[in-house]
Image (tube, rainbow, N blue to C red):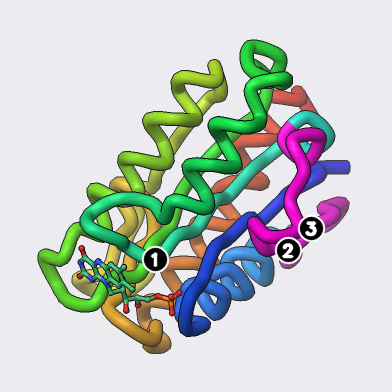
Amino acid sequence: MAKILVLYDTHSGNTRTMAEAVADGAGAIPDTDVTLKSVDDADPRDLFEHDGLAVGSPTWCGQMTWKLKKFFDESTCVWGKVEDKVGCAFSTAGGQGGGSEMTCLSILSVMLNYGMLVFAVTEYSSPGMTAHYGAVAVGEPDDRELAACRMLGRKLVQHVQRVKGS
Ligand SMILES: Cc1cc2nc3c(=O)[nH]c(=O)nc-3n(C[C@H](O)[C@H](O)[C@H](O)COP(=O)(O)O)c2cc1C
């Protein structure tokens, strides 16, 4: 059983829509238990108790939101104890070039600092749509962007299965 946490922050709902699609993609793989959680309800133990973690943030000034950064800053009780956990990121920004990929990198950077294994995706979910640094969208995600989110969720489970040797 792969235990997946899709953790997100959102101000106007777009990142939550992406999070639901990531969760759908992960949940489409058999023997996967997926939890969807707002950062408002998250606890440091969530990082420890799941095998795979997808974190989504709206792009705020080119980075993850302060709430997500605060969560990671306050979760250092599990720092160094999550080295077998697999992580990935997703983000929606106000515009193309607004920093969504930098936001994904800001999330992956913290995951690396915690010692997690991180990945993104080289595949294309549709022509012209990939997720090399994580799944990204502009504003409210459209169907193609949601398909990339589902692809990210599927990949997360596949990587977790590889790490767990199942
Ligand atoms: C405080 C703040 C900072 C933002 N900074 C950026 C930014 O740097 N680049 C950008 O393209 N959009 C920026 N936006 C727009 C949001 O990233 C965008 O509206 C996003 O889709 C919101 O996602 P949400 O509905 O999950 O809150 C910002 C919005 C807010 C409220």
Question: Which picture quadrant has residue 80?
Answer: top right
Question: Which picture quadrant has residue 49?
Answer: top right
Element on which disc 3 rests = strand
Q: Are marks 2 and 3 in contact (CB under 8 Å)?
A: yes
Counting residues from the N terminus, which is met first, the one under dot 2 or under dot 1?
2
Crowd tier of the residue under label 1, counting other residues whose Cα lies within 10 Å: few below 14, some 14–19, many 20 or above:
many
| Residue at the (52%, 53%) spot, across then down | 67
Element on which disc 1 rests = strand
| Residue at the (67%, 71%) spot, across then down | 24
**Farthest top residue?**
80
Q: CA distance from mark 1 to mark 3?
A: 21 Å
Dot 3 amino acid type: Val
Residue 4 position, x and y percent, is 74, 48
Q: Which residue is mark 1?
A: 58
Residue 164 position, x and y percent, is 76, 25
Check residue 17 for magenta coloring: no
What are the residue bounds of the magenta stretch?
27-47
Residue 139 position, x and y percent, is 32, 82
* In this picture, residue 22 sits left or right of residue 69: right
Counting residues from the N terminus, which is met first, the one under dot 1 or under dot 3?
3
Q: Which residue is mark 3?
A: 34
Q: CA distance from mark 2 to mark 1?
A: 16 Å
**10 vs 69: above or below:** below
Q: Nearer the viewer, residue 152 or 66?
A: 66
Residue 36's disc is 2
| Residue at the (47%, 83%) spot, across then down | 12
Mark 1 against mark 3, which lies toward the viewer?
1
Mark 2 against mark 3, which lies toward the viewer?
2
Q: Are marks 2 and 1 in contact (CB under 8 Å)?
A: no
For ligand 1, tell me if the residue under mark 1 lies within 8 Å: yes
Dot 2 amino acid type: Leu
